Amino acid sequence: MNLKKIIKPAVLQANAYHIPKAEGLIKLDAMENPYAWSEEIKNQWAEYLKQANLNRYPDADASNVRQQLKSSLNLSDNIDILFGNGSDELIQIILLALNKEFNSVLAVEPSFVMYRLLSELLELNFSGVLLNGDFSLNLSSVKVSIEQQQPGVIFIAWPNNPTGNCFGEDELEQIFNIAPGLVVVDEAYHVFAQKTMMSYLEKYPNVLLMRTFSKLGLAGLRLGMLFGRKEWISQFNKIRLPYNIGTLNQLSASFILDNIEILEQQAMQIRKDRQTMFTALTAINGIQAWPSNANFILFRVEDKPADEIHAALLDNKILIKNLHGSQALLKNCLRVTVGTAEENEKFISCLKAIISS
């Protein structure tokens, strides 16, 4: 049987999203919260999970988690929530819903790679608008692309990944006002930015907002959230596969929402350590680092190839993200996640030694 006759060209041409092995390494590559729960909290969580009836299908609507979120965020009756197996599934659902007359997708670049990857796999017309050299938004180019492409959906990561910056709210409002279709604001890192565009959902009916539990400290839970007007969420819910959020995931989310101060305290520590790491990075000769509103820092080494730096750090059992070659503006760039104080110190110490060698 000829594989090329069965599999569509977009899949044949694509590369699988690579996840490097990290066993035995200081893992600073994936924007994860480095802090585990205390034994006391783990025991309380395990006790909470005993109510699960695993012989039954989960609540298809994740009703308890939805109500907890709506209450804690003080959402109006106009706003509903769709849950996905991480943000990736939510992006896929939105793209699957697009009418063929609005099958263009727009995002700035560099940004979250899944916007482009999923669009191309679904054979949609993807347009990536380059950021400025300092990673600020090139608003005039975005406007031109909107006019030319008439996208059905625009994705804006806020803060942006991998650059870590938040574009101006006034700039985003201009996009909201001229977008012919939906605008999805991806707030995966909102807890580290301490700002949100949630209130804009009431003002702009074409705006959706996406979040995830992953960056908060529950990457293993795989739970994404899409907020928006009920009329949009009800349509996307038709595409969502039944029972996509398991019982244990729902119970775990409910448990942590009742104990959210744990994650808030961890996020506060990460923000503090982010500043310490940024100060240490910028003090190293030959390094350019960009201020970040997320839980990672993008930096460039001027006198040594990023590939060499990445490999040398791996030799020292430290894994960060090598972005060189992924996009023109990211030439010789690397991204490091903010870890524990001990992990950050080890990273900075090794980096200094590598650069000076």
Image: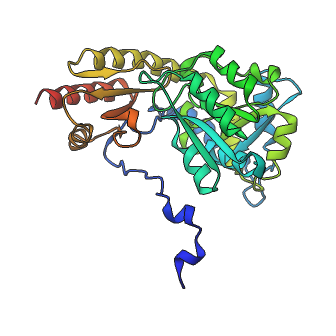
Which of these two is toward me, 22 or 308? 308
The answer to whether residue 357 is left or right of residue 307 is left
Which of these two is toward me, 140 or 119? 140
The answer to whether residue 321 is left or right of residue 55 is left
Which residue lies at the image location 81% right of the left edge and 19% below the top edge? 203
Which residue lies at the image location 17% right of the left edge and 28% below the top edge? 355
Q: Is residue 123 visible?
A: yes
Which residue lies at the image location 79% right of the left edge and 46% below the top edge? 236
Looking at the rendered image, the quarter that the C terminus falls into is: top left
Q: Is residue 210 visible?
A: no
Color style of the picture:
rainbow
Vertical side of 125 occupied by 150: above or below: above
Residue 344 position by quadrant: top left
Which residue lies at the image location 34% right of the left edge and 34% below the top edge? 334
Vertical side of 248 occupied by 232: above or below: above
Measuring from the top left, give residue 192's x and y in whole percent: 53, 21
Measuring from the top left, give residue 52's x and y in whole percent: 73, 50
Vertical side of 259 occupied by 319: above or below: below
